Image (cartoon, rainbow, N blue to C red):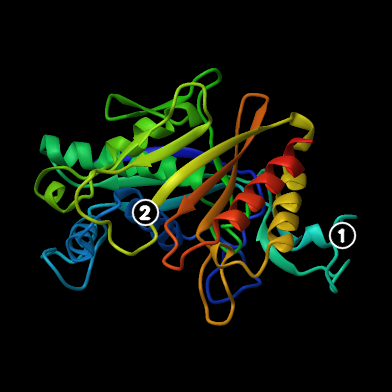
Amino acid sequence: MYKTVIHCAATSPIFMAGADKNNPEMRAASIKGCMRFIWRAIQGAADKESLRSEEGILFGSAYGENENKQSDMRIRIVKKSIAQGLENMTAHREGSGYSGVNKGKKVLAQAIKSGSEFDVIISGFGETPEDENRHINFVRLFVVTCLLYGFGRRSRKGFGTVQIKTEKGEQTINVLGRCVNTSLGALADNLNLLLLKGKFAKDMYGVKYEKPQGENVIVAKRGTTGRPGRYPYIEKIEIIKIPQAKAGQEIINRIGLTVHNHSGNDFLGLSRPRFASSLLLSTASAGNENFCVITQLCCTKAANEAKLAGFYNELRGIITK
């Protein structure tokens, strides 16, 4: 049996709960669902049916080629220091730049507070090199998910972010004798290592993640033949460095304000008809440096490029001034 213990800390409020919304808790099934979503977005497959089949083998499925119907991955949460209480999901409404009709109106919900610590234990069974590599990639996927996404409600708007705690001065965790780098600098490499190989390669659109030298952007480069499937795969990831003074809740509030100022655009999602945002907005830190991570997914509705550029420019200006 393989087992890796990952030490974690919440860096923004996590709005996650079961049936009782007044009792927030870290839920293994929810974490696994977020990892599954990010894994699918990474692949950039041309054949969605093949993608769905491979996904079922890794994460469990009620149909397809997965005979066992269960995932090889098991996740368990161990609480260490958890603080709970009411948190404001719309703090940006209290700022001077807010112009909406609900100025000053708070939306309070029970949450796991920033600074809470817990362990995520990822385990699985196997004895072959392939099984071992699969376990390492499950851990790698958790690392990538923490950088690109949050957990729970409002996770696309900067809430629910989790930082992996490593030994002082280290940026890696030991997984079966191999090192998995947890830093933003290793993000492109980790994305490429998570791409499926072998029989699935024929259904890929030739995606490869590249980070141009001197730029804080990771671009999903695609082949010249075939067409990608119409689903939310990663197009690019932009990493914006922000001053220490603008870290934490203030960043989330300014993300919320930028989203408010550009609401109504398809790329930020719609309520009627229901359409999720194609931008994942997360925060990350390294030492004394803080970053906003913007993951742009393919939007099945053609985005207005000028308005999308305006959103990026305003977000850069707000959080870097």
Residue 89 seen in this snapshot: no
Residue labelled with disc 1: 94
Q: Secondary structure at mark 2?
A: helix
Specify whether 71 is left or right of 106: left
Q: Is 59 displayed left or right of 236 in the figure?
A: left
* 244 and 135: which is toward the camera: 244
Residue at x 28%, y 43% (from the top left corner): 207
Query: Which percent across, then down, holds residue 191?
Result: 35, 38
Amino acid type, label 2: Ala
Q: CA distance from mark 1 to mark 2?
A: 34 Å
Quarter holding the C terminus is top right
User: Horizontal and vertical percent for residue 317?
Assistant: 74, 41
Rendering quarter of residue 247: top right
Secondary structure at numbered mark 1: helix
Quarter of the picture holding the N terminus: top left
Residue located 45% across and 62% down the image: 299
* 74, 164: nearer the viewer: 164
> Along the horizontal axis of the image, is 60 left or right of 214?
left
Taking the spot 24% from the left edge, 56% from the top edge, the residue there is: 227
* Count of numbered marks: 2
Residue 89: image location, x then y, percent: 72, 63
Q: What residue is shown with label 2? A: 41
